[in-house]
Image (cartoon, grey):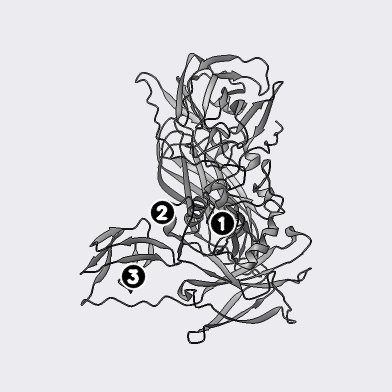
Amino acid sequence: MKKASIFAAFAATACLASAQMLQSVPAPTFTYEAEASESSMEFGYCGEMATYIGWSNAAEATLRGTIQIPTETALRFEGAKVSKVLIALGNTNFFDSSIYISQGLEDEENVYDQEAEFMPGTWNEIALDEPYTIDGTEFFIGFQTTATSTTGVGLYPFAVDAQTANPYGDYIASHDGTKWNYMHLGDAGIGNICIRLILTGEGLPQYELELQDISMKEYMRTGDEFSISGVVKNFGAQAIDFYDVQYQIGNFEPVTVTIDNRIESASIGEFKIEGISVDTDGKYDVKVTITDLDGHADEDPSNNSLTKTINCMSNLATRKVLLEQFSTSQCSNCPRAHDILHTILEDNDDVAWVVHHAGYGYDTFTADASRKFTAFYGGYTYAPAMMLDRTNLAEQGATGSSSAGSIPSATPIFQFTSEKAVEKLINYAVSQPAFVSVNIEHSYNEETAELQVRVFGESMVEFNESTFMNVFITESGMVNYQAGASNPNDYVHNHALRTTMTSTWGNEMSYNEDGTYEMTFKLNLKSAWNVENMEIIAFVSNYNENDVNDCIVHNAQTAKIKSAAVETIGNDACSVWANGKTICISGEYKHADVYAMDGRLVKSANAMPYFDVENAGIYLVVVDGKTTKIAIK
């Protein structure tokens, strides 16, 4: 079936002059309890609802949300009955609502219709008056409703999950007064409609696990370790406590790994196999297969395998991606974007993160260069937004924002949609090859505040265009106002661009005959800057003043200007230690701050003998001005 394009009117997760953000909501807990006498299971393509989507400039619309049960799935459940439908909806008023079943997406006549009442912002359970018997042929099942805004303008009726869209589970439609206009949410990088079916009857599959996705680096340096990640979904009636994943690289011997991870019926599971390496250059197919479910054979092995290709090359440099985020203190949606990136990038050494305080106005942390980098928007600015290696990722699902709403990215800048979508784009960028290395050596004179930076490396290829060296200086740990934060006047800003050591678009590079290069820069840092929280980011890029899509970053590297001084607190003052995720402080003190190693303030306490931190990691605990380093496991 041909995919329809998504409406340009969908609202972006952005701060705009005339648009609201996609609202995030806590995922409700919902469990269907079957009658004791019946065999039953949930079936659907969606996870829990994560976001409401719709239109920022609409007050009313007649809508449909639909999922498709293709022939191969209908045959799998032949003879079972659809007894109930579970539908989650956005925070909107709903009228004249119904559920329906059709045999074609655009059929004028439905084979089943039933009136329904929908509650907003939650899962709705609708029992079918006459359970629908699956006869092995394709059918569509969904809801129809008229939605009206609760505020008079801004309509967000659809609840969607945060997963990658399944092409059978992401149909929406609006009626223009004459006909239904259907589209796939996946075309805009948005997930699945929140619709699930309760199937009852004999003969339901008991053990069936589908391998839905696998990911790994497409290019890597020969001998370097890499990982294989995957997503599975339990389409059987039984919960699964463990399953085997087998991977085979080229003609090498297959390797089997047992994944000990319980997956309830109709639920998603994820796995990650680390420490894999290939010692010989080449292009290899990597086949990943699910081979065992709690000791049972999978009842439908046709969906248990996926294959991807990797390229192992000795002449690759280690890859570090340049992530440029656009965020300002006036942007009420930006704290959520910061949280998403902190979650994705925690313990990730493959990304250099810089924040430009531009895109939705400017603020006290706006650097001159950041103002000029808004040229990457192509004329329509918003926040939160980001770039990865200044590369247009529209083909990978990145969406931009326009005065009409969401559109495929026309430039390297794209909007935040969901954590999964952003993580997928970051993983794609990290997987790309790097044919030039970037290394940093530096020195800092505390008396004169002079910073000297030497950037050097080697190109493994001859570039067709001129390349430019860029050196950024960023600072973290700055407390200032941030709209949308839980404590807006005490928000900690990190990774902010302070200045550049090169020209705004970089200094043109020259290479020696053997492909090596070396460049040196000097800068006096301002006294107002905290050097212990500052970082150097160097990267090699193209620059085309006439085309923002031709300014691609080839590779990047980072270095801390100065490691924070660590002074162990003596017994005559206080002792600091960790007990699990609890930080304990013995002795009297007034105030303690806990910082992550990137300078981010994660906890403050006054005269408390112990308190908890949320995540494992290395932290600096500053007690009345004295610092100690501890590890939280």
* Place of residue 631 in the rendered image (x, y in percent of width and height, measured from the top left): 34, 66
Does residue 6 appear to the left or right of 537 in the view shown?
Answer: right
Label annotation for residue 327:
1
Q: Disc 1 on helix, strand or loop?
A: loop
Name which residue type carries label 3: Val
Q: Report, in whole angstroms, how far the alpha carbon at label 2 lies from the one at label 1.
A: 17 Å
Residue occupying image coordinates x 66% and y 37%: 9
Q: Report, in whole angstroms, how far the alpha carbon at label 3 lies from the one at label 1.
A: 28 Å
In the rendered view, tell whether residue 13 sits above or below residue 524: above
Look at the numbered discs 3 and 2 and tell me whether their residues touch, using CB distance below 8 Å: no
* Place of residue 301 in the rendered image (x, y in percent of width and height, measured from the top left): 54, 36
Mark before the other along the chain sequence, 3 or 1: 1
Name which residue type carries label 1: Ser
Mark before the other along the chain sequence, 2 or 1: 1
Mark before the other along the chain sequence, 3 or 2: 2
Where is mark 2, residue-wise?
Answer: 487
- Depth check: give the residue in front, 236 or 19: 19
Does residue 487 appear to the left or right of 11 in the view shown?
Answer: left
Q: Disc 3 on helix, strand or loop?
A: strand
Residue occupying image coordinates x 64% and y 67%: 369
- Depth check: give the residue in front, 373 or 350: 373
Work out which residue is located at the far top of the displayed protein and give it. Answer: 130
Does residue 375 appear to the left or right of 272 in the view shown?
Answer: right
